[in-house]
Amino acid sequence: MELNDLFGFKGKSVVVTGTGSGMGHAAAELLVDLGAHVTATTHRRPLDLAVETTVACDLSTKEGCDKLIVAAPEHIDALFLCHGTADEFGGGNALEVQLTNFWSFKYLAESLLPRIVDWGSVTFISSNGGKFWRDHVNECLELADRESWDEALAWYEGHPDLTHLGYTFSKECQHSYVMSRAQDDAFIERKVRINAIAPGLTKTGLTEAFERQIDGNAENGRAVIESLYLDSWNGRYATPEEMGWPMVAIGSKLFSYMSGQIVYIDYGCASEDEMNLLVD
């Protein structure tokens, strides 16, 4: 059997967001190589891939998301949501982080769901930063049940303590949403699978922004982040391909019986934290 047959993307229609760099770029590049017809989004960076359609849009806004919805194909075999942003030092972009990293994911997934074919897939890029989702699962699900962009804005305004948790809360929301929707009627009646990968420390276009979060100094932040995520196992940064490629596999027919899963790709960091909680 050929590799393209195993993945099942040859001639299929897929949508990939956040393809200007990093994991989304790696995923889109592999999908092009596998023969998919790719509709890709980019925001601040030009796209250097031979995709079928490029949509330039800001997915932190309803207008940007609606632009993609209008441009997306009538029939979608797989949806890969890879876009994201990082907290600024001081938290001045907290709402933008929430809208970009969670609400737009829900909004796009549910808006495009009627176009996703039976037995199709939705796959998110989340983060192992959402590994403590249980701490806020009720709030995450309350937010996930909002039906409109305006309702989401009102919810965030009414929950400033959670909104200002920034990146981690947005990823906790992603985790909670994926697990709660796997057997939701809207997905399971047509056997549309929904999963997410939860990457560990990866070199991407957001790396420096993550490093500046600690005290505004990237060098100091880098030392803190590496001590937390790498020192305990003498580890290394992942490459974008080490995240984008597994994501494509999960959204393919190779994983046709998997849904509602958060797949941690972080060399055991999240597993170690879970074990430490149990031992403590």
Image: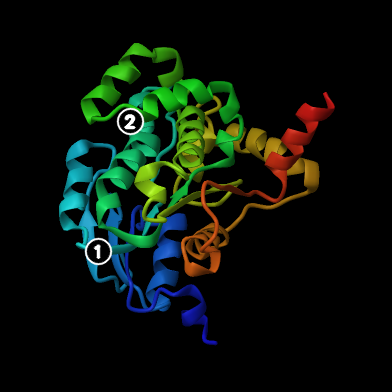
| Amino acid of disc 2 | Glu
The residue carrying pointer 1 sits among few (fewer than 14), some (14 to 19) or many (20 or more) residues within 10 Å by Cα, namely some
Left or right position of 226 against 36: right
Q: Which residue is mark 2?
A: 96
Q: Which residue is located at x 21 percent, y 25 percent?
A: 150
Q: Are marks 2 and 1 in contact (CB under 8 Å)?
A: no
x and y percent of residue 33 in the render?
41, 77
Left or right position of 65 against 141: left
Q: Is residue 46 visible?
A: no
Q: CA distance from mark 2 to mark 1?
A: 30 Å
Left or right position of 229 against 78: right
**Which quadrant would residue 274 be assigned to in this image?**
top right
Dividing the image into 4 quarters, which one contains the C terminus? Answer: top right
Q: Nearer the viewer, residue 140 or 63?
A: 140
Q: Which residue is located at x 30 percent, y 50 percent?
A: 113
x and y percent of residue 32 in the render?
37, 74
Q: Where is 58 relative to 191, above or below?
A: above
x and y percent of residue 65 in the render?
23, 44
Q: Which residue is mark 1?
A: 75
Number of numbered discs present?
2
